[in-house]
Amino acid sequence: MTQPALWKSVSVLAVAALGLMSAFAGPAGAADKEITVQAWGTTWEQGLQEVADGFEKETGIHVVPVTQSGSSDGLARLQSMADAPKIDVWFSTSSLAARATADRKLFAPIPADKLSNAGSLIDGAKMEAYVAAYYYPLSIIYRPSLVKKPITGWKDLWDPAFKDSLAVPDVETYAGRMLLVAALLNGGSIDNVEPGFKAWKELRPNIAMFYGSDSDSRRALAQGEVSVLVGPPSQAAPLRTDGIDVTVLSPKPSPVMFDVMTLVNTPRQDMALTFIDYVLSPKAQEIISNKIDMGPVNKTVKASPSLAAVLPAVADQVSFDEAKVNAAIGGWNERFKAEIAR
Amino acid sequence: MRIGGLPWLLLPMTVLMALFFGAFAVFAFVSFLQPASGMPGYQGPFGVANYVRFLTDPTALGILAETIVFAIAVTIVSILLGYPLAYIMARSPHRIIRSLLLGALVLTFLSGSINRAYGWLILLGRRGVVNDALLALGLVDRPVALVYNWTGVFIALLHFTLPYFALTVFGSIRSVPAQVEEAARDLGAGALTTFFRITVPITVPAIISGAALVFSLAISAFAFPLLLGGGRVRLISNFIYDQLFVSFNLPFAAASSTIFLIVAVATLCGFFWLEGIATRRRIPMGGLA
């Protein structure tokens, strides 16, 4: 591991430890104007911390971060404290949020009239119980120095020249989008993933690792264990910071996903809603776009030039019915483990 | 001490055990319920459907069988490598060798499993030291896939379990009086005969204890398959995790855990039974109490 990467890991751990200590210290340690936000460590460190600092400066409300390695782990933590949640805002993938927020004891609806930025959001960003913080496509990130010719589209990944060279997300990670891309490329759809499984089987010789963690896949690309990574463009920023040259492209069909904020049913809902609204504000969206390399959901904000260059054209974007994804993902995962990841 | 006379002395231990097993008892109770439709959680009716599903699902049974075979393989190799290592640590005439081996083993024992997993990723990777050496020696013409597969998980898990086995057996070998081995040598037995017919049989109970420890660790391995398996290695712990965090089927995860626990405990009982037999045989043979 390179020094900056090691330092980042230490920082993330420190943030997590401090967050957990402060968040769960109990009433004696809690300030009057304080909320707790659970998000991914890397995302927090890359940009959400800066957003939270701006929020505190503007409102006087302090934000305590609690990190999660994945949305599922975060949800498990929330459910374990369901009777008296100590987390006020939870960042999650939209797929998991769609499933989890059906629990109306744990999660509260987010009224649009409480969000001054609600009218500026892109289509699909605001649902009854969650609101998107940013969007991102599933992209191809690769190291030009380790591949023989530039990659131009998804089909290139099936080229035998990439034998043992790819890191692709497993079914759980990015909610089955890799399977759905493979299905769409071969005439399938969310209702017919058979061509996707067939294509994925053909891709197996080229896959060095199926990953469940962004940091693991990023490390593999950084160490040259793989030369190509399928993931969101935000994976490129930390690599570039570490001096690793990577190229990003978001070919057609480009599945676009949201990471969203949910409002946990706590007595601090008003302050939590203020925070959610702040994240949607142009000021915060610019930070998210520039620092985390995620697409802004506020229409008045333009993506940073470097991000705009790799975001897919609207015509190339595809999205999927989260309810269908949630209903099928358990079965897809079992089939993936039995037939593909062997 | 006659425990029957002071039953209250059992109270603290009973409370402690109740706390330890209470959490699992709640989990096991959930295994008789059904997942709530559309959201994480569970609901009635009460029944054994999750157990029936596991016991009739070839995939689930296959993973359980694969986990047991894998754990047995790790245990056997731990014995084959760990016993000679422990023997050298206990019997080497060179103090520096004994100290170095023991120090290295204890250091390994104390380093965390995650640290070790990442260490192995660096060592065994395509651009790692091992592949560099194989390429430099001309033994291979392209890097060998040593991680993100069963091989990597096996190596890392073996490295993790070896100190447990070696340190368990080490004490037992040291407690074998040197005079017993010397007597065998005086009576004409060679070094190997003494080792296999005197030292090993006397230490069989420790070998079984160490093997049981290694088996327990191997059968419940979670982090190594996750970090080094590249998504291809799925042991029963990973299967249970998937049921919890991908399918959000808590009752089925609980039923899988309960079945896994029963199988693991039954296997360990087998180890203890073997240990009992070995101990009973050892006493009349060696005359050691």
Image (cartoon, coloured by chain):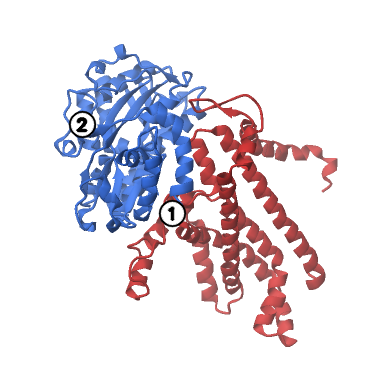
Chain colours: A blue, B red
Distance of label 1 from label 2 (alpha carbons):
39 Å
For residue A91, say whether it is visible: no
**Local crowd size for mark 2, using a 10 Å CA cut-off: few (<14), some (14–19), many (≥20):** few
Q: Is residue A97 above or below residue A246?
A: above
Q: What amino acid type is highlighted by mark number 2?
A: Ala
Whether residues under marks 1 and 2 lie with C-beta atoms below 8 angstroms apart, the answer is: no
**Left or right for A276, reference A25:** left
**Local crowd size for mark 1, using a 10 Å CA cut-off: few (<14), some (14–19), many (≥20):** many
In depth, the one of B235 and B109 nearer the eye is B235
Mark count: 2
Residue A312, given in percent of the width and then of the height, sits at 21, 36
Q: Nearer the viewer, mark 1 or mark 2?
A: 2
Query: Which residue, as the protein is rendered here, is positioned at the far top?
Result: A113
In depth, the one of A22 and A141 nearer the eye is A141
Q: Is residue A47 above or below residue B284?
A: above
Q: Write down the quadrant of residue B53 in the picture.
A: top right
In depth, the one of A131 and A62 nearer the eye is A131
Residue A178, given in percent of the width and then of the height, sits at 35, 41
Q: Chain of mark 1?
A: B
Q: Is residue B235 above or below residue A331?
A: below
Residue B184, given in percent of the width and then of the height, sits at 73, 82
Q: Chain of mark 2?
A: A
**Which residue is disc 2 drawn over?**
A315
**Which residue is disc 1 drawn over?**
B228
Query: Which residue, as the protein is rendered here, is positioned at the far front?
Result: A187
